[in-house]
Image (spheres, rainbow, N blue to C red):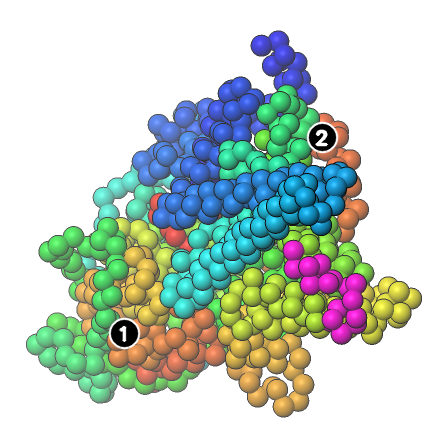
Amino acid sequence: MRRFFQKIKHMPLTISLAATAIVFTAIAIKGAGSIYDDSERDRLTTPVLSLVFNGINDGEYPWDAFSGKTNETISEASAAEVSEAAQESASEASDTANAETTAMETTAESAAVDEQSTDSAESSSTEVEPEEPVVEDLDVPEAGTETVQLDGKDSALIAVTDNMVNAAENANEEIDVQRESNPDYVEADSMPEGVNSDVMGAVDYGVAGRRYLAPEGAAYNTDTTGLFAENGHYYKFRTVDDSYFSDAIFIGDSRTDGLATYGDMKGTSFLAKESLSVYRMWKIKVPFRFADGTIQKSTVLEVLQNFHFRKVYLSVGVNELGVPTSVDFYDNYRDAISIIRKLQPDAIIYIEGIMHVSKNRSSSDAVFNNTSIVERNTAISTLANGHDIFYIDMNPSVCDENGDFLSDLTGDGIHLKASAYAKWHEFLLQNAIVRSDELDNIGSFPTGW
Amino acid sequence: MVIFSGLQFIFRFLPIFLLVYYLVPAKFRNGVLLVGSLVFYASGVPEFVILLIILTVINWWFGCKISMARRSMSRMDSMLKDDVGDIYDAGPGGRLLRRVETRRQLTHHHAVVFLVVLVVLNAGVLTACKILALTVDSKLLPLGMSFYIFKMISFIADCYTGKITKPQTFINTAAYFTMFPQVTQGPIMRFDEKYWETKGKTAFQAERFEKGIFCFIIGLCLKVLLADRIGILWNEIDKIGFESISTPLAWLGAYGYSFELYFDFFGYSLMAAGLGMMLGFPFVENFHHPYASDGVAKFYRDWHVTLGAWFRDYIYFPLGGSHCSKKKNIRNLLIVWLITGLWHGGTLNFVIWGLVLGLIIIWEKFVMKGPMEKFKVIGHFHVMVLIPLTWVIFAIPDLGQLGLYFTRLFPFSGNSGTAGNVDPGDVLRYLNIYWPLFAASAILCVPATYRAIEKLYKKAVGKILLVALFWVAVYYMTISSSNAFMYFSF
C-alpha cells in the first residue's frame, strides 16, 4: 500500500484527471435533479458527467446547479427590459410604417436599416413562467405584450405593436376593395385544385424507425381560419418574377442557407442556419441576410419583431427527423406558425414541405427516410388554409417518380448541389400567391414595424 | 466502444480495464489483456470476433510448428557439422548422417510449406474480404483485419527466419495479435520476443504510465479538436458539388483534407501508443513529422511508419529491394506501391494513387537525386504541393468526380465549361471560419512545435493546460454524440 502511495506521487497527470472527473461528476449529480435532464442518457455507454457538457452547450452553466436555478424561474428585470424596448422600436418605426405602400425598392439606404442597427432590443433574454400555448383564430390582433411558449419548454415576451394592428386592418380593408379584379381569387365550397401543393409521396423502403413516426390513428387538429379570404373563397397559385420576393423572408435550415447562397435570389431576406429546427428556432443567433445585401447575426424572434414582411416562407423539418414523433413535430410546427402569425399579422405564410432525401438514404436510414418525411409533410400541410397560409411542396422538381431525391442533384443525399438550387428558385416563382391588395404592387422593400 | 475518441471507451472500458489489469498479479496481465481485447473487439463487431480467434489460433499453432522445425533444423545442423564423420561414408556413421540430412531437408520442407500456406491463407482471407466489401457490402471487411493480418504474417515470417527464436505461448501470441490498442487501426507492431517474455515480471512504471496518458491526450486533441473539425470543410465542398466550387476553394479543400487525414491518423496513432504505454509497452512511433520531409520517399518513411516498414521488410526486401539492377529496383518499387494502393482500398482511384506515388518516388530516386540534394526546396515542394494533390486522388473514388475536381484545381482554358453556379466569395467565407484550424495545422506540422509542447509539459502550467484541453475534447465528443434528440446538423 505504501508503495502505491509512493508511485502516486509520480503521477500528477493521472491524479489531476481523476480529480477533475470527480468534480464534474459531482456537479452533474447535483444538477441532475434541477437543471439537467437525465432521462435520455444511456447509462451503459455515457458517463453522468456528460450532462455538464451538454448543459454548457445548451447555455446552462455548472454554477447554476448550485444557485437553485431551474428552467422556470423568472428574471423580472429582463422582462421589463423587453417590453420597454419593444415599445421603443414600435414608436421609432411608426414613421416608416407608411413606406409600406410606396413603390418597390430593392436597393440599400432605408430607414429600416438605420433603425435596425440602433435597435438593440434584447427580446430574447427572458425566462418567464410558461403558460398554456395560445393558438388563436386569425383575426386582427390586439396591441400589447404577451407571453408565448417557444421551443416546447422556453418562453418569450413578444410585443404586438400598434403598427402590426394597423397593418392587419389595412390589409383587410384593401383586400375587400380589390378582390373582384383578382383572377386568382376564386369561389368554392371547399379547397379547389391549384391552391395548395399536393404532398408528394414516396416509396416506403421499410426502414423507417417506428419510434419517429406518428402512432396509429393520429389526427391533426387545425383551427386556423383565414384573414384575407372570406369563407368560401380561396387564392390560387400563380407565376411571379423575382420582385415578388423583395418583401419576403425565408426562414430555414441549411437547405435554405444553400438557397440563399446559390439560388440566385438577391434582394430577398433570409434567416437561415444549419441545425435550425422548430425545437431551436427562436432564440439562437442566425445569419440574417437582409434584402439590401447586408448580413448580420440576429435571432428569428428579433427579426420578426422588428421588421414587417409580407411573405414568410418556413422550411424546416430535416433536423427534427431524429426526434420522435411526427405528432410532436406537428405540434411544435403549429406553435411556430402561430407565433409568426402574431408578429407578421398580414403576411402570407408559406409552409414549405420538407425536401425528400435520396434513395440511398431513404432505403437504409431509420431516421432520414422519405416515409417519415412524407408523414410529417402530410401533417403540416393540414395547417394550410388556402386563405393566408399555404403549403408548397417543391419535391416534384427535384425527385424522381418514386419520390426519391435525384442522385445527380445531391452529393450527400440530403442537400441540393449548388448547381441545382435554380430548380427550387424556379418552383418558388411558379407557386406564388398574390393577394388582391397587391395586384399592382407585388413586392416592395421590407420596413420596420 | 471501439472508438478511442468516444465517451464509452474513455469513461467505461478503459478505467475498468486498467483497474483489473493492475489489480491482478503481474504474470496474469497478458491473459487479462487478451480477454479484455476480445471483449473490446466483440463490442464493436460481435459477428467477426470468432474469425479473429480462429485466425489467431491457426497462426499461433503454425508459428509454433515453424519455430519447432527451426529448432530441429538447427539441432540437426550442429549434428551434421560437429560430427567428424563423413556424410558419404558407407558405414553406419555415414548412414546416420544421411538420415539426419534427409530429416533436415524434410523438416525444412515442412517449414517452407507452413510458411507459404499461412502467408497465402492470411493474404487470401484479407483479399477475399476486401473484394466482398467492394462488391457486396462494405461491412464484410472485419474491423482491423488489414492490420491484424499483417501482424500475423510478420509473426509467421519472423518465426521462419528465426527472428523469433522459439515457440511462443498461446496467451502471449494471442495477446499480441488482438491487443486492443492496436487491433482496429494499428500501429503494426512487431513481436518482440524478449519483451513479451519479461513483461510479466516487470513492476508498474509510474513514469511510463504518465507518459502514456500524455500521448493519449495529445492524440485525442489532435483528432477531436483539429481533424474532426477541419474535416467538415471537405464535407461542405462535397455538398456544394465539385462543379460549383471556385479554384481557391478547391485548393483549400485539398489542404483541408490532407490535414484532416494526417491529424486523424496521427492522433489515433498517438492514442494507440499512449494506451500501449499505459499497459507497459514501449512507445511505438507511427508518424515522424512527415510534412517536414525533404522528399516524397522520405515522407513515406515518416508516414504510417509501421506500415511502410512492414512493406519494406516483407515485400520489398524479399523481392531484392534496391540491391539489384536498376530495372529490377524500379519493378520492385512499382510492385510495392501497387500493393500499397490496393491495401488502402480496392477501387481504381487507390490503384492510381499508389502507382502515382511509386512513379514520383522512382522519379525522385533516379532522375532528381542530384538536384534534390543541392536544392532542398525541390523536395519540400514535392511534399507540400504534390502530396496534397495525391490525397485528392485518394479521397475521391469516382473517377469522373476526380477529374472534375482536378479541372477545378487547374482551370486552364477549355476546362471552365464544367463549372456551374460558382459563388465567387466561397473561399473567403470558408477561410473566415476555418483559418484558425489551418493555422494550427501548419504549426503542428513542424517538429519544433512538439519539442516546445514537451518542454511546456514539464512545468505545472503545461500539465494544467493539458488537463483543460482534455476536458475541452470531452466537451466536443459529448455534444457531437448527444444524439438523443439530434443526429447531425443539416
Query: In the rendered structure, the residue with mark 2 lies on which chain?
Result: B
Please report, as a chain letter, where disc 1 is located: A
Name the image quarter holding residue B418: bottom right
- Residue type highlighted by circle 1: Gly
The answer to whether one can see residue B381 in this image is no
Residue A403 is labelled as 1
The residue that disc 2 covers is: B461
Inspect the image, locate mark 2, and give the three-letter code of the amino acid beneath it.
Val
Q: Is residue A84 magenta?
A: no
Residue at x-position 89% and y-position 69%: B370
Most extreme residue toward the left is: A189
Looking at the picture, tell me which residue is in the foreground, B24 or A373: B24
Give the dominant element type of the magenta stretch: helix, strand or loop.
helix
Q: Is residue A358 left or right of residue B238?
A: left
Q: Which residues are magenta?
A: B314-330
* Above or below: residue B463 compared with residue A316: above
Residue B39 location, quadrant: top left
